[in-house]
Amino acid sequence: MSKILICYYSKSGNTEKMAKEISRGVEESDADVEVDLKEVDETQIESLPKYDCIILGSPTYYGLPCGDIKKFLDESIKHHGDLEGLVGGAFTSSANTAGGNETTIVALLESLIIHGMIVKGMPKGDHYGPVAVGEPGEKELKHCSYYGKWMAEFTEKIASLEV
Amino acid sequence: MSKILICYYSKSGNTEKMAKEISRGVEESDADVEVDLKEVDETQIESLPKYDCIILGSPTYYGLPCGDIKKFLDESIKHHGDLEGLVGGAFTSSANTAGGNETTIVALLESLIIHGMIVKGMPKGDHYGPVAVGEPGEKELKHCSYYGKWMAEFTEKIASLEV
Amino acid sequence: MSKILICYYSKSGNTEKMAKEISRGVEESDADVEVDLKEVDETQIESLPKYDCIILGSPTYYGLPCGDIKKFLDESIKHHGDLEGLVGGAFTSSANTAGGNETTIVALLESLIIHGMIVKGMPKGDHYGPVAVGEPGEKELKHCSYYGKWMAEFTEKIASLEV
Amino acid sequence: MSKILICYYSKSGNTEKMAKEISRGVEESDADVEVDLKEVDETQIESLPKYDCIILGSPTYYGLPCGDIKKFLDESIKHHGDLEGLVGGAFTSSANTAGGNETTIVALLESLIIHGMIVKGMPKGDHYGPVAVGEPGEKELKHCSYYGKWMAEFTEKIASLEV
């Protein structure tokens, strides 16, 4: 059974709502996966290598992931090399449409890529990863759920390889 | 009198609508500026150094400015160094909300920064530069007009220096 | 047998040297792959979906891929959706160390991600993809060769899935 | 007299060496400026609006500024809007040539742009801002010193406006 971590920071609750809906999508998928949904300050760096997929969620603060998520990434250097070949993904909530959400997700993907992780985009919808502007509405939550399902299926396939 | 160039590529007409509204904003400002509104294939590379401000507009194609705008930037190497200290800006229209519009604008700003140009963000609204998702509506056009006015005033000030 | 396309633009010859060395790395790998090495203006958009992996190479022009490569990406919209699940990669040569090479590669990866392609980083060496500053020397060419081998093996694995 | 803040985080000492050399460049310039050189945890968020220029320095951690610098930026929201029109700049030290240094600087510039700050690139040298790979050598320190001088002169001019 493959394991997926959804690790997020949320102050307003918007990113948390997205995280929960992605988690629901993972659980509702037909893939043989289980999911851990954790706030970043409850997540053990030591636990990272046991996952097959790590999805990071952050609010958009000044066009980048928030400091808590960034500190977590900084500390993940303990496992530099150990996360190679894991699947990675990212999502964010921002205050405005062109308010830095894409640059936040791309920033997170850059960090995951430096870990040697595997990133896959979506030709439809939010290409780089799920985005909500303000409180996520029905459409955004549906996209989160779809994303969770889709990441579960992708992770199951990748985990069957020895990348 | 300061001179502003708005240089754009538009296929669907959405980017062109934004360009025209930014141009109107420049004209309606109180700043002592004049504006040239030109499609990219009508713009002479040789003319670039005579401007005090260059604003580039492109549709979002695969998260980046379109090939025509990029080719124009490639050719601008003829004037590498000559554009230092000019004001630069960028805008884009994209098909989707998280469809690559921010990465397109940031890409354009990166090119302008490499030319040594001066870029200023906006603490309110579309921070990196105006974005429209699909056909620009009333709100987006108003923002374009505001942006034009704001760039006109900024350019007038910068042009009064010898940067 | 998996098929890899290395598609590049080169004016000074530096990007071409990298392309050839990546191609050699693919050929020398033990993976069951074959490689097509093509200049971008010889590459048929129609051929893209037959590949299992597409690696794009461009010189760094103003911090971004050159116009010819960008135009090629623009035209690839004909196959939007058809490239989902293919492996993607990118490399660049630039004039200076901090001269825009990383932003060029990240720009290319963004486009590939929007196609729904699969991107994997390297925890060692040039994380986002191979970079040469000026004419690629022995170290850079060795890294290119290593990258080709590594991409061949990764592609063989991914192609065995049905992503 | 204009005031410049150089605010940095440094663990290995490499970023600190760059910071000191930029500071020296500011001091040696003919511009009528004074400089405060501060580690990020000694910098008061409340002090930010009193500066005419803010230059941020960070090591490159996973292709982005470190968590401490990011937290500082997050907290700077207290003064959102108040920093509009200030000059902004960034520098970084990284372990490898293509190891994420450009994406770190561009990330910092994105944050400064969202604050409404004014960013200017350099047509020569490290276009986005000074970069050192490993311990900064003579060439890199010279570039830092040049950058400090250049930022001092630019800040003096901008501060004379009312942007």
Image: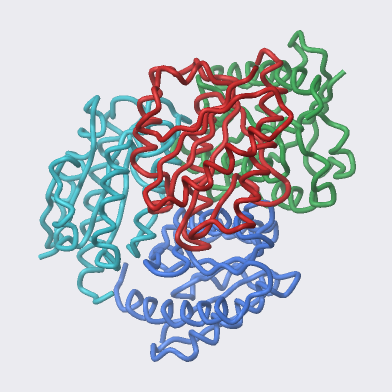
Chain colours: A red, B blue, C green, D cyan
Q: Report the quarter where the N terminus of chain B lies.
A: bottom left
Instruction: Specify whether D157 is left or right of B89.
Output: left
Q: Report the quarter where the C terminus of chain B lies.
A: bottom left
Which of the 4 image quarters holds residue B159? bottom left
Which of the 4 image quarters holds residue C38? top right
Give the answer, above or below, for where A84 lies relative to C14. above
Q: Nearer the viewer, residue B90 or C98?
A: B90
Q: Position of residue D132 (x, y in %)?
A: 34, 33
Give the answer, above or below, for where D32 lies relative to C106. below
Q: Position of residue A93 (x, y in %)?
A: 49, 52
Q: Nearer the viewer, residue A146 or A83?
A: A146
Query: Looking at the image, which residue sits at the far top?
Result: C30
Residue C106 visible to an observer of this rendering:
yes
What residue sits 34% from the left and 56% below the top?
A: D112
Q: Position of residue A145 (x, y in %)?
A: 64, 44
Residue C135 visible to an observer of this rendering:
no
Q: Position of residue C59 (x, y in %)?
A: 62, 41
Give the answer, above or below, for where C7 lies relative to B137. above
What residue sits 65% from the left and 72% below the top?
A: B15
Instruction: Specify whether C3 is left or right of C6.
Output: right
Q: Nearer the viewer, residue C154 or D154?
A: C154
Instruction: Specify whether C20 is left or right of A140.
Output: right
Instruction: Specify whether A131 is left or right of D146.
Output: right
What residue sits 45% from the left and 60% below the top?
A: A95
